[in-house]
Amino acid sequence: MNYNQLLSRAQGGSVSAMLKLYQLHANAGNMPKAITWAQKAATVGSRKGMVLAFLELARDGHARMEGGGENSARNPETARVLEEARYFLERALQNGYNPRKERENIYALFMDLGDCYFFTDRRRDAFECYLKTNNLEASIALAAISASCKLEFLTGTCTNIVLTDDEEAYVFNRLVKALRSKKLNKDNTAEANYMLGSMYEYGIGTKKNINKACSSFERAKKLGHAESARDLKHYRKKLFGGYEYIG
């Protein structure tokens, strides 16, 4: 069967022809066309098409994130690609897709999409995405959202998300578990300790404890975390074995 015949069959609604066109374009390096045919196969109900659409869209979105970092995360086009990937993933799951073989791709998708939401101030959406991945880095991201929301709540500034006590406790315990795993790299370990200090400082998911906050900030500072060094300056005097806050 030549290309034109294959195209004709695909345009007539043949899912197998759509998937073959997907493969042909993917092999030729034309991913936009490949993704288009995977999406079409998914739209007409092919579970395989949904899976292919999800995988390729997620990889495309992840490549955008890797190439552009935070700037890419703020780009609406990156979020659109990742949201499409999420849509086809959820359709695939509803149709019996077993994600075990692609678990890391799924986690990467939700992590990337969470970053897009976070950098565009859609923190509840970001929070929900980070919850769906078991990446250790997601534990830090969840803590960052929790700390920023708590600070806004305490200062009376406007916030678009308020976490429940149970959510805060979950985030705290997950962050502690990530640190105890000792699988974080140096930079993430520093950031995780800083976030743990912030949670102790403001009583997020745990009782407020300035001693433990300072201990966490100190560990982060030793790993080169600049903000921890700055925050420690606010805790200068020891008082009865503890620290007195100097605002």
Image (spheres, rainbow, N blue to C red):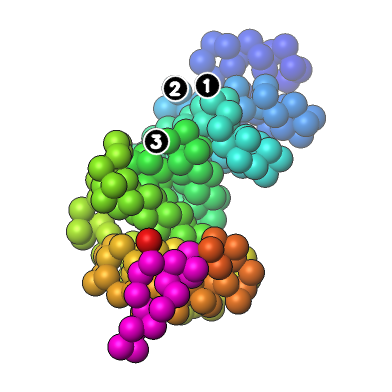
Element at badge 3?
A: loop
Looking at the image, is mark 1 or mark 3 nearer the viewer? 3
Residue 44, numbered circle? 2
First to last magenta residue range: 231-246
> Can residue 26 be seen from the camera position used here?
yes
Q: Give the residue type at disc 1.
A: Lys
Coordinates of residue 166 in the picture (x, y in percent): 21, 60
Residue at left offset 53%, top offset 63%: 230
Coordinates of residue 147 in the picture (x, y in percent): 37, 55
Between 37 and 172, the one lying in front of the other is 172
Q: Are marks 1 and 2 in contact (CB under 8 Å)?
A: yes
Residue 68: in magenta span: no
Q: Earlier in the sequence, mark 1 or mark 3?
A: 1
Residue at left offset 76%, top offset 17%: 2
Q: Which residue is mark 3?
A: 122
Quarter-of-image position of residue 188: bottom right
Looking at the image, is mark 3 or mark 2 nearer the viewer? 3
Coordinates of residue 208 in the picture (x, y in percent): 27, 70
Label 2 environment density (alpha carbons within 10 Å; few <14, some 14–19, many ≥20): few
Marks 1/2: CA–CA distance: 6 Å
Q: Give the residue type at disc 3.
A: Arg
Residue 237: in magenta span: yes
Residue at left offset 61%, top offset 27%: 35
Coordinates of residue 199 in the picture (x, y in percent): 35, 65
In the rendered view, would you say 76 is above or below 211? Answer: above
Residue 40, numbered circle? 1
Give the residue at the far bottom of this rendering: 241
In-image side of 25 versus 155 (left or right): right
Quadrant occupied by the C terminus: bottom left
Residue at left offset 60%, top offset 14%: 9
In-image side of 90 versus 6 (left or right): left
